[in-house]
Amino acid sequence: NAGVTQTPKFRVLKTGQSMTLLCAQDMNHEYMYWYRQDPGMGLRLIHYSVGEGTTAKGEVPDGYNVSRLKKQNFLLGLESAAPSQTSVYFCASSLTGLEAFFGQGTRLTVV
Amino acid sequence: EDQVTQSPEALRLQEGESSSLNCSYTVSGLRGLFWYRQDPGKGPEFLFTLYSAGEEKEKERLKATLTKKESFLHITAPKPEDSATYLCAVQAGGGADGLTFGKGTHLIIQP
């Protein structure tokens, strides 16, 4: 049972480049989330989804877009990367919208 | 605005030296309070959910308790493998729009 799988694990981008982070879960969870974790800031919610075909903004959504075309996948896109988006990104999923289970993270550096 | 404050930021203990971590919260209608463990380079690992004041949960050397304003994570006779960052999070009533996290307590258990 893989749980929540994030791809890629590491990435270096140049300012202005675009990329997509993929999150896949095999637990049939309805809810999925993208967080970023920065030193001294804790985990902050970027976007979330309460079911297939739905998305909503979290605390820090600017500069990011998301899509949930399939229930098991939640994609996070950066259209034009900026150094301020250097962070560790975590995807999570939840059956009930309460306990969330996290992936291993994607470490992104924008230079 | 929901807020979670964890203290201390860091704690160094000797093996076998029991202690407690604090999580103070302000939230409009608590649906649940969550404790996670995070090892370096890994995603948060779910430990406990507490729903109402007076509730307690235990797992091995860890015990979580909840009051109307704060939660404690008690660590009894810790071992070096308990070293990690412990995160507290809350979910407010009315929606499934993700968790609000504290900044964590970095715990080091010395042999």
Image (cartoon, coloured by chain):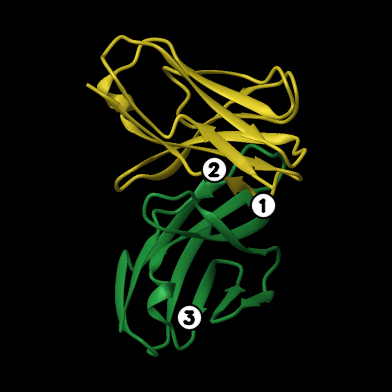
Please name the residue shown 61% across and 68% down the image: B68
Q: Which mark is residue A103?
A: 2
Q: Amino acid at mark 1?
A: Glu
Q: Chain of mark 2?
A: A
Identify the mark at residue B75; answer none if there is no mark.
3
B107 sits to left or right of B75: left
Residue A66 placement: quadrant: top right
Q: What amino acid does circle 3 point to?
A: Ile
Cβ atoms under marks 2 and 3 closer than 8 Å:
no
The label number, if any, that marks residue A99 in the structure image: 1
What percent of the width, then of the height, locates residue A108?
A: 35, 30
Q: To which chain does the residue with label 3 belong?
A: B
Q: Is residue A66 above or below residue A89?
A: above
Q: How many callouts does the rendering have?
A: 3
Kind of residue sitting beneath label 2: Gly
What is the quadrant of residue A103 in the picture?
Answer: top right
Residues flagged by tags 1 and 3 on a common chain: no
Taking the image as shown, residue B58 lies to the left or right of residue A42, namely: right
Report x, y in % for residue A13.
30, 19
Q: Secondary structure at mark 3?
A: strand
CA distance separating discs 1 and 3: 22 Å
Percent coordinates x, y for residue B13 in the rendering: 31, 81
Indicate the position of residue A109 as horizontal and vertical percent values: 29, 28
User: Separation of disc 2 and disc 3 at Cα?
Assistant: 26 Å
**Residue A94 appears in the rendering:** yes
Chain A shown in which color?
Answer: yellow
Question: Residue at the location (41% across, 62% down)?
Answer: B6
